Amino acid sequence: VFQGCGQPKPAPALRSARSAPENFNTRFRPYNPEERPTTAAGTSLDRLVTDIKEKLKLSKKVWSALPYTICKDESMTAGAANEEECWNGHSKARYLPEIMNDGLTNQINNPEVDVDITRPDTFIRQQIMALRVMTNKLKNAYNGNDVNFQDTSDESSGSGSGSGCMDDVCPTEFEFVTTEAPAVDPDRREVDSSAAQPSRSLLSGSLVCVALALQRLCR
């Protein structure tokens, strides 16, 4: 083998691993778990959350404070001295019924509102539960935990038989129009069949004549 191929060359020496230089500067900063992320616009996420909380505080009691806000507006209501000129819901006079306090339980004796507090409002409770679930998801996402946000539009598309029909009413893909055959007299059927026989014999005779003419032309 050595005579035919020659002496093998020695393997080159391996390069020694070099250590990173001391002045090596990367474009990535060291990770700090206490540092909050920033948005695409460069705004701190903590600042956005604080701004949203302040705006929510302003609208927290908007419905309960709405009557007082309207009553304090001089351009919309009359003063205390002109209460006789106000509309009390029935006539132009002073409002005589007792003013109820805020809250659902205080509306039992309110003649202006028909509220049944003995039965819970299922719609409002569903909205409260949905807000609580979303609040917990946002808290977990803010703290860095994995949260599964499911789109409502995907829920409707995944349910059903998959046929794409709404309300279980599907149009037929092909509509066949069928008509009943008219009643034919047996005697007429025999006449039609007998009349068709001469036409067939005439057609066969004409074909034979054409074949003979072509044969003569070929000769």
Image (cartoon, helix red, strand yellow):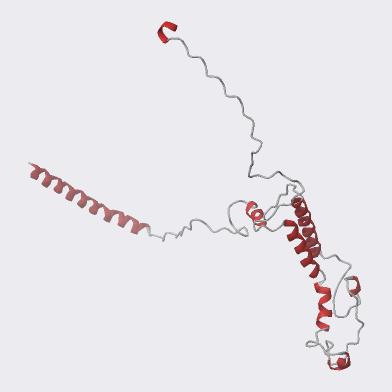
**Eyeballing the image, is 17 above or below 62?**
above
Q: Residue at x 71, y 49 (%)?
A: 148
Q: Residue at x 88, y 87 (%)?
A: 95
**Quadrant position of residue 42:** bottom right
Say whether residue 54 is left or right of residue 95.
left
**Quadrant position of residue 79:** bottom right
Q: Position of residue 45 (x, y in %)?
A: 72, 56
Residue found at the very far front of the displayed protein: 23
Q: Quadrant of the N terminus?
A: top left
Say whether residue 112 is left or right of residue 195.
right
Q: Nearer the viewer, residue 38 or 113?
A: 38
Q: Position of residue 198 (x, y in %)?
A: 23, 53
Say whether residue 187 is left or right of residue 33.
left
Residue found at the very far left of the displayed protein: 219
Q: Position of residue 157 (x, y in %)?
A: 62, 54
Q: Position of residue 134 (x, y in %)?
A: 76, 56
Q: Is residue 45 visible?
A: yes
Q: Residue at x 37, y 57 (%)?
A: 186
Q: Is residue 59 visible?
A: no
Q: Quadrant of the C terminus?
A: top left
Q: Nearer the viewer, residue 77 or 117?
A: 77
Q: How many marks?
A: 0
Q: Nearer the viewer, residue 87 or 122?
A: 87
**Eyeballing the image, is 207 above or below 91?**
above
